[in-house]
Amino acid sequence: GAGVSQSPSNKVTEKGKDVELRCDPISGHTALYWYRQSLGQGLEFLIYFQGNSAPDKSGLPSDRFSAERTGGSVSTLTIQRTQQEDSAVYLCASSGYQETQYFGPGTRLLVL
Amino acid sequence: GQQLNQSPQSMFIQEGEDVSMNCTSSSIFNTWLWYKQDPGEGPVLLIALYKAGELTSNGRLTAQFGITRKDSFLNISASIPSDVGIYFCAGPKKAGGTSYGKLTFGQGTILTVHP
């Protein structure tokens, strides 16, 4: 596609439920990143995929968070047993090898 | 990871005024990036700086990479209503890293422009 797309745009869930957030990177981009943006805050790095290398998971805040990237393209970020503090905008970005990151519009997650 | 301190937190200006915001760190950065985020959108890269002392312009935007490599500023001249948004500085999360991996972001500067 023309840019990074994310779905859903908005997600409201109840505390304790699992959620899956999807990211479709720009075609041909080898690197994919997930960030979290809490209200009034900057972006917080979560996880980074580069090609076929093992992902850098150093930013995941807890073991309730996981992500996978299938076929080197689409990525899914899963949050298990959601908590209210997980409420945030989850942003995905992709880039070519050693190139600028392009961001998607984000998924706004609200945990009630 | 490295931390970025961005100021001011918010600015309210009249259309036509110039704007300046800055970012500082206690650690040295090899790259400084400036992004703008419109409501409901993801950040968009405005300017990238790769060399200490570098001064780069993009239209009405000018950014500089501080000589100490611990700071950067972004100036917007003759502001217009569409400049409204949140401006973020960013740099490699790992000390000595490149801009091609995970980034760390400042807290953002919220810019409001009154017509």
Image (cartoon, coloured by chain):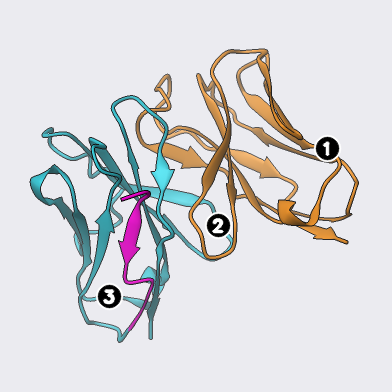
The residue marked by circle 3 belongs to what chain? Answer: A
Q: Nearer the viewer, residue A4 or A56?
A: A4
Residue position marked by numbered label 2 in the rendering: A41
Q: Residue at x 60, y 57 (%)?
A: B38
Q: Colour of chain A?
A: cyan
Q: CA distance from mark 3 to mark 2?
A: 20 Å
Query: Which segment did they paint magenta?
Result: A1-12
The residue marked by circle 1 belongs to what chain? Answer: B
Q: Residue at x 20, y 54 (%)?
A: A75
In terms of secondary structure, where does tag 3 sit? Answer: loop
Residue B77 disc label: 1
Residue A51 percent location from the top left of the image = 16, 34
Q: Amino acid at mark 3?
A: Thr
- Left or right relative to B89: residue A103: left
Residue B87 disc label: none
Q: Residues within 10 Å of mark 2 (few under 14, many from 20)?
A: some
Residue B70 percent location from the top left of the image = 62, 23
Locate residue A24: give its quadrant.
bottom left
Residue position marked by numbered label 3 in the rendering: A82
* Chain coloured orange in this rendering: B
In terms of secondary structure, where does tag 2 sit? Answer: loop
Q: Nearer the viewer, residue B80 or A66?
A: B80
